[in-house]
Image: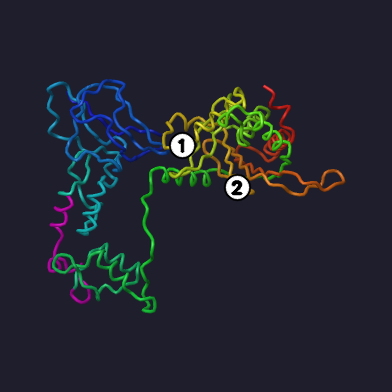
């Protein structure tokens, strides 16, 4: 019996992803454990393993690279030797029936050209996908102006609902536009073409220059998580400036004595280690809401913010207190390279108990970071800069760094949060004694 290959859920909140590519060819033998295809989920592209064996078979209308796919959507089949693929495709699941059916880029382009609203089209391809034939059939069913007086304008012209909406948004008098659709029907492209020709002094709105970028699943996930964090937490941020002169001197000593560039600890590596030690003294800063109770992790797994072309990612360094500074340096570089290459796994993105976001390399002095749920606190680190500082009775040049601790006031009071920040300040001002393994 044919085994269905469906889109898995790569994250707890994932509802859709982007299909990357097949790692096996149709007709090729697949054995359990083979990597079968690539799927871009919430925050990473991942190779998906096959837990079954058989010969790969792809139905008509199977997703193409770059297509958006829904969790549970049929991708293909694994067949026994000599077995024929199913002739009837399963109906879309109830979980996705209310969502707009998926359609590839070429189908979406055809829908725009024929002025067809994809939300009104029923897909007949595998998994309920909309095919080009579905779009053309929907276009043929579009009524003519004579058959639908409701779609005929003041001067006997027909206009599609989409074109009418765009005309209203762009403040265009569509009764003055010549339609290019069937029987002279005005389409969206006709309205936009007319808008691009409106002079700035005509009272209309000239077309804007620019482009529309596709919102990736990663950006959607980041937006959703940021919105959730700001709406579901009582966030408060404490700011302080710390004398980082000894930290700078220590970093210079590491650079002078370093065996290789990859293993020389950077400022972020030292701060990660010191933060983990401070969390050891204030473990409740790692508390998380779980089923109506506060759960305090027994280990320290620190997520670090990495800026990538795809968006902000936060891979996790596990068991930070047990790692030496050189081990941390190697691990942070490894995770940063994987993040920027789009190669992080789901496991490398989960399980963090505290997050550090360092924008010092971008010249930022201080900022207010947003909590990375389900965590309850996050540390923002600014750039290290040299300032005149009063030391005793003298004004001396010292290196200073700004720290910003955002915490959930539902979980922590200001006093415990301030004490943690003060402990971290002490560690940074005199880092040497705390870093002896």
Q: Determine whether 101 is above or below 253 in the image.
A: below
Distance Cα–Cα, label 1 vs label 2: 23 Å
Question: What segment is highlighted magenta in the picture?
Answer: 134-156
Residue at (48, 39) in percent of width and height:
313
What x and y, as percent, mark residue 294?
57, 31
Under tag 1, what secondary structure? helix
Position of residue 239 measured from the top left corner of the image (x, y, whole percent)? 67, 45
Residue designated by label 2: 368
Q: Is residue 80 left or right of residue 344?
A: left
Quadrant of residue 80 within the rendered picture: top left
Q: Please, which residue is most extreme toward the right here?
A: 393
User: In the displayed structure, does residue 12 sit left or right of residue 262?
Assistant: left
Q: Position of residue 220 (x, y in %)?
A: 41, 46
Residue 280 falls within the magenta-colored stretch: no
The residue to which callout 1 is attached is: 339
Front in this rendered view, residue 358 or 83: 358
Q: Secondary structure at mark 2?
A: loop
Residue 334 shows in the view: yes
Q: As displayed, is residue 428 above or below residue 100?
A: above
Residue visible at 14% across and 34% down in the picture: 88
**Residue at the (14%, 62%) spot, across then down:** 143
Closer to us: 374 or 107:
107
Mark 1: few/some/many CA within 10 Å (<14, 14-19, 20+): many
């Amino acid at each position: 019996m044919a085994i269905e290959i469906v889109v898995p859920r790569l994250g707890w909140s994932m509802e859709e992803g982007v299909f990357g590519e097949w790692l096996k060819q149709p007709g090729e033998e697949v054995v359990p454990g083979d990597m079968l295809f690539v799927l871009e989920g919430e925050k990473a592209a991942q190779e998906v393993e096959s837990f079954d064996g058989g010969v790969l078979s792809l139905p008509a209308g199977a997703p193409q690279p770059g297509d958006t796919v829904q969790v549970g959507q049929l991708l293909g089949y694994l067949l026994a030797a000599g077995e024929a693929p199913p002739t009837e495709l399963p109906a879309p699941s109830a979980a996705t029936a209310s969502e707009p059916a998926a359609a590839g880029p070429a189908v979406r382009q055809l829908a725009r050209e024929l002025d067809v609203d994809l939300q009104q089209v029923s897909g007949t391809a595998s998994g309920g996908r909309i095919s080009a034939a579905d779009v053309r059939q929907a276009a043929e069913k579009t009524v003519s102006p004579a058959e639908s007086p409701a779609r005929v304008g003041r001067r006997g012209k027909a206009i599609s609902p989409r074109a009418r909406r765009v005309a209203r948004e762009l403040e265009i008098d569509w009764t003055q536009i010549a339609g290019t659709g069937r029987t002279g029907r005005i389409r969206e492209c006709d309205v936009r073409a007319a808008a691009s020709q409106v002079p700035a002094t005509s009272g209309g709105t000239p077309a804007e220059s620019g482009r529309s970028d596709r919102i990736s699943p990663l950006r959607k996930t980041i937006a959703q998580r940021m919105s959730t964090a700001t709406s579901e937490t009582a966030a408060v941020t404490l700011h302080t400036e710390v004398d980082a002169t000894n930290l700078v001197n220590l970093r210079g000593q590491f650079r002078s004595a370093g065996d290789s560039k990859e293993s020389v600890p950077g400022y972020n590596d030292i701060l990660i280690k010191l933060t983990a030690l401070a969390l050891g003294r204030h473990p409740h800063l790692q508390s998380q809401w779980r089923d109506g109770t506060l759960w305090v992790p027994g280990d320290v797994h620190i997520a670090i913010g990495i800026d990538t072309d795809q968006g902000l990612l936060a891979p996790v360094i596990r068991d930070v207190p047990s790692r030496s500074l050189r081990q941390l340096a190697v691990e942070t570089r490894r995770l940063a390279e994987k993040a920027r290459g789009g190669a992080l796994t789901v496991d490398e993105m989960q399980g963090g108990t505290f997050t550090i976001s360092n924008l010092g390399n971008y010249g930022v002095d201080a900022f207010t970071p947003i909590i990375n749920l389900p965590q309850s606190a996050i540390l923002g680190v600014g750039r290290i800069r040299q300032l005149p500082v009063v030391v005793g009775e003298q004004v001396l040049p010292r290196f200073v760094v700004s720290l910003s601790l955002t915490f959930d006031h539902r979980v922590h009071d200001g006093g415990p949060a301030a004490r943690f920040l003060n402990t971290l300040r002490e560690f940074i001002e005199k880092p040497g004694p705390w870093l002896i393994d």
